[in-house]
Amino acid sequence: MLSRIEPSATMDKLRIEGGQALHGEVGASGAKNAALPLMAASLLSAQPVELEQAPRLMDVHTLGELLASMGARVERDGSRLRLQADRITACEAPYERVKTMRASVLVLGPLLARFGHARVSLPGGCAIGARPVDQHIRGLRQLGAQVDVEHGYIVASVPGGRLRAARITTDMITVTGTENLMMAACLADGETVIENAAQEPEVVDLATMLRSMGADIEGAGSSRLRIRGVSELRGARHRIVADRIEAGTFLCAAAATRGDVTVRDCVPQHLDALLDKLREAGAQITCGADWVRLRADSMPGGRPRAVAVRTSEYPGFATDMQAQFMALNCIAEGAATVTETIFENRFMHVQELVRLGARITVEGNTCVVQGVERLSGATVMATDLRASAGLVIAGLVADGSTCIERIYHLDRGYEAMEHKLAALGARIRRVS
């Protein structure tokens, strides 16, 4: 059985006493954004799939429950997940199980490819933008599926039972769209080419596991994927790639608090765009094979320098790091612009940062952040997953006590964040 992870009550909060520099070492967990498509990929085979370094997160638990409701066996042993989809009884993802998690749409491609039909609720998740699934639907139609949207559900079937290869060019770069279409193409007849494919490390990680299952995939990590369909896939054992967003969040927290922190069990090259910005802010950074050390305790002038950022698809500056870096800019020397190009509604944390004393103005998809010497503690509300992390960083540097409400957002993507930060010297605790 999948061990139970209880959702944090909506009344749970984080209370932070700011002003403490972070010092020490912290390990990065397996990436949420890799774990979810890897779990969905287990539907492509009747043999067991074992995932090592699986993070204990609400989204991982929710997808595990969804797979179990379909008839898959899902077991957790520590940080290892074992999934086996040899007895699937229902190719449906109902609204009640997926309303909080956009990644639920990732079961669509595998179900269609292996079973020839699927009924999947339109997904929910963080309210940071429209994030339409039209690219998924369009690509699956090109692969020969009949797809309709009825009463809030994507209803799809494959005439003849087997998808057909196609050349697909997405209108926009979409990570989950690339993953869904890549999984579907693994069992399609012929050779599929996906142009304008996402290049994120999590996409590469999925391709790596699919190849170990017997898939024929070339080009992962580039904008063109080539997938030659096979008749069936086998099981596999795979270690989930490290969470670059969690690692980056700890590095931003270390820079903001003017601390000295080493993040272990990470992939430094996945953080290149962020590390360049942190160096520009004045942090000293050294990297090893699987670790990054950031020192900000001797920044010139004692404060970080304000640094402009513009989000873009990998290998650019990740949209999932925008809120955390904005928190750093809030207490930096000077002013900087933060431009969001991926999601149209990802500045909801701005008003909460202003409550803490930040000076931020918003014009369209750009913020101007005028750094201040200090923030002051207050009660704030988390509006989405990464906004939550930005507010935590702001609370770590604010004078006095900061209370962050609605931290169930945080629990979707960060494993035991308050415990990891406390081990680095932060004064932080969860309260009801």
Image (cartoon, rainbow, N blue to C red):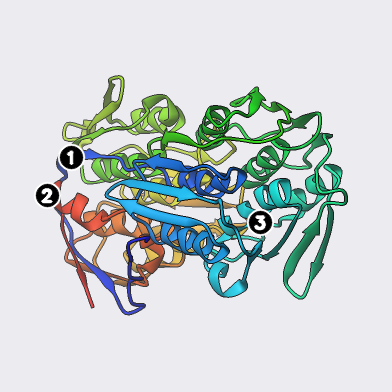
- The residue closer to the viewer here, 33 or 126, is 33
Quarter of the image for residue 2 reads bottom left
Q: Work out which residue is located at the far front of the displayed protein and give it.
A: 87
Task: Please state if 424 lies on the left or on the right of 142 as rendered.
Answer: left
Precedes in sequence: disc 3 or disc 2: 3
- Give the residue pinned by disc 3: 131
Q: Residue at x 54, y 46 (%)?
A: 42
- Give the residue pinned by disc 2: 425
Disc 2 element: loop
Q: Residue at x 34, y 53 (%)?
A: 76
Q: Residue at x 69, y 47 (%)?
A: 114
Distance of label 1 from label 2 (alpha carbons): 10 Å
Task: Please state if 77 lies on the left or on the right of 140 as rendered.
Answer: left
Disc 1 element: loop
Q: Nearer the viewer, mark 3 or mark 2?
A: 3
Task: Please state if 361 lies on the left or on the right of 306 as rendered.
Answer: right
Q: Confirm whether residue 322 shows in the render.
A: no
Amino acid type at mark 3 = Arg
Precedes in sequence: disc 1 or disc 2: 1
Q: Position of residue 100 (x, y in %)?
A: 52, 68
Q: Confirm whether residue 112 shows in the render.
A: yes
Residue 259 numbered tag:
1
Disc 3 element: loop
Q: Position of residue 312 (x, y in %)?
A: 59, 38
